[in-house]
Image (cartoon, helix red, strand yellow):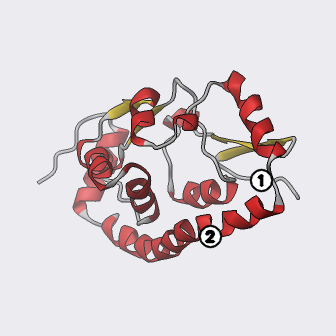
Amino acid sequence: MAIPKFKDVLYEETDGVATVTLNRPDRLNAIRVGMYEEITEALCDLAIASEIAQFEQVGPKVGAVDPVFGTALLARVVGQKKAREMWYLCRRYSARQARRWCSSKRSFLTRSSMPRLSAGVRSGWTAARRRSASPLNADSKQIRGISGLGFGAVALYYRTDEAKEAGAALRQKRKPKFR
């Protein structure tokens, strides 16, 4: 299989294990519209974050709106209440805090422990497991399809005075003055 080329995501595959890295360090790896598709295409079956990773939803602070996929998937991963807290309060969370929200402690590993995990996955990667991935992925594919509708709503939002003020405030490194 050919290694995909992305604009905002680094994709590296070694011995059947892909490493996906958000690659917008100048923007603190903030996700923009095109990145949704890149991340969705690039991600295999397990998401692993470094123990020093930090998670923060800044979109609402800067007038950005998620078209559906990110918020819906977030709610399914961490639960409705925690997803709402993240979107409404825009706080920063450590990997340790995020680990508590997920059912698997294996979601957050050090880079040195990744080879052990990937070897375990590869050693048991049977045809039955490969076929199991499709139904597991079906739910997120449904959300992805619905998010196309959300992009239209987002385009309308970005034409509002609120969105324009939020963007200007972000560029000028000041708090937005919402009415």
Q: Amino acid at mark 1?
A: Lys
Q: Which residue is mark 1?
A: 5
Is residue 102 in sight in this rendering?
yes
Judge whether 149 appears above or below 8 on screen: below
Q: Amino acid at mark 2?
A: Pro
Q: Is residue 120 left or right of residue 143?
A: right
Q: Is residue 129 left or right of residue 163?
A: right
Q: Which residue is mark 2?
A: 135
Task: Rate crowding at label 2 as few (under 14), some (14 to 19) or many (20 or more) other CA atoms within 10 Å.
Answer: few
| Residue displayed at 30% across by 56% down | 80
Whole-percent x, y for residue 34 in the image: 57, 59
Whole-percent x, y for residue 146 in the image: 46, 75
Is residue 17 in sight in this rendering?
no
Marks 1 and 2 sit apart, C-alpha to C-alpha, by 26 Å
| Residue displayed at 29% across by 42% down | 169
Secondary structure at numbered mark 2: helix
Whole-percent x, y for residue 148 in the image: 49, 74
- Tell me where residue 170 sits by quadrant: top left
Sooner in the amino-acid sequence: mark 1 or mark 2: 1
Judge whether 149 appears above or below 164 on screen: below
